[in-house]
Amino acid sequence: MAGLDVPAGEPAGRGQRRAPRVGSVEVLAGVLILLVVVREPLARALSAPRLQTWTTVFVSVLVQAVPFLVFGVLLSAVIAVFVPRSFWARALPRHPALAVPVASAAGVVLPGCECGSVPIAGSLIRRGVTPAAALAFLLAAPAVNPIVLVATAVAFPGRPEMVLARAAASLVVAVVMGWLWLRLGRADWIRLPRRPELDGAPRGVAFWTAVRHDVVHAGGFLVVGALAAASINVLVPERWLRALADEPVLSVLALAGLAVLLSICSEADAFVAASLSQFSLTSRLVFLVVGPMVDLKLISMQAGVFGRRFAVRFAPATFAVAVTVAAGVGAVLL
């Protein structure tokens, strides 16, 4: 029909109506309307004891982890933007096998938890640090920094051997995993997100761009891990733990698995371990060594920062080494 012809020189589709876009404002309005409609059933559901427990665990994991995640993200951005590559060449031994224990020992002087160590390790690799050394730092820093060791001493008063055992076992695991990566790891297992927006930008702009990117990227996986930890916390019956406490081998494996599932921040896990008084000190040491290195939120964040191919290999290997080393150190020192 002539009336529907597009005038000459006018782009096709200009005369047609565009479909309305649904933006964040519309989505928020829809969510608010939905909450108003279902407010009474939602209030009844939230009053259930199991759901209250789930909410408490979910919020506590986030509250514990977010400050240290932000600290790690800020330090990661500083490393990525302001620290020259030549610094790492001077700070770490050139031989990768020697760089691993040096990077592990560096975790002793850096306060933080596992949420912050993941983006820091990613920045170290981007700045030219050998992955084995960066991964050793990732494992050591959350478990042997001063805040964690002091918290462990407070949680286990009169038992300085518990602090020593935790520090020794965690350092050994970090070094062993770094050396295993040198021996068996492959570069194509690590897929760091590309950061073209940092190239050529002014330092101030690049710094805040890196901060925003890492907070959104790592924070999303932190929320996924917290959701999983809260769900499993509610689903695992407490009576199972009591039944396992009397079996030496099973108690070690039970607390190792519990550390993975609970996903407690390393600054707070010593108080949880101290409360598990029905278990042996060795079992609780395994809990303290495994938790900062392998838990649900940490696995999720590793998958987000380094890629899924890395996480599905690194996490199980770290779990096996951590359980073995912690049980051995506990048998000797405890």
Image (cartoon, helix red, strand yellow):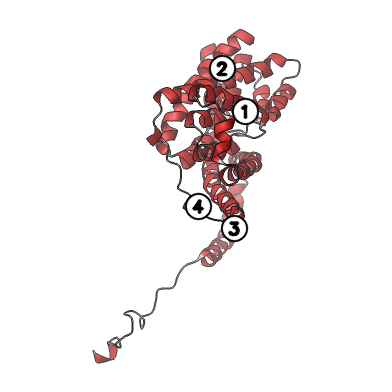
Q: Is residue 52 visible?
A: no
Disc 4 or 3, which lies upstream in sequence?
A: 3
Give the number of the mark in front: 2 or 4. Answer: 4
Q: Nearer the viewer, residue 52 or 121?
A: 121
Q: What residue is pinned by disc 1?
A: 106
Q: Quadrant of the N terminus?
A: bottom left
150 relative to 8 in the view: left or right: right
Local crowd size for mark 3, using a 10 Å CA cut-off: few (<14), some (14–19), many (≥20)? few
- N-terminal label among 1 and 2: 1
Residue 183 visible somewhere in the drawing: yes
Quick one: SS at disc 4? loop
Cα separation, mark 1 vs mark 2, equals: 21 Å
Q: Which residue is mark 4?
A: 199
Amino acid type assigned to the residue bearing label 1 in the image: Ala
Q: What residue would you read off at disc 2?
A: 326
Secondary element at tag 2: helix
Does residue 215 lie above or below 92 as drawn? Answer: below
Q: Which residue is mark 3?
A: 39
Front in this rendered view, residue 89 or 257: 89
Whole-Å distance between the Cαs marked 1 and 4?
Answer: 28 Å
Mark closest to the chain's N terminus, 2 or 3: 3
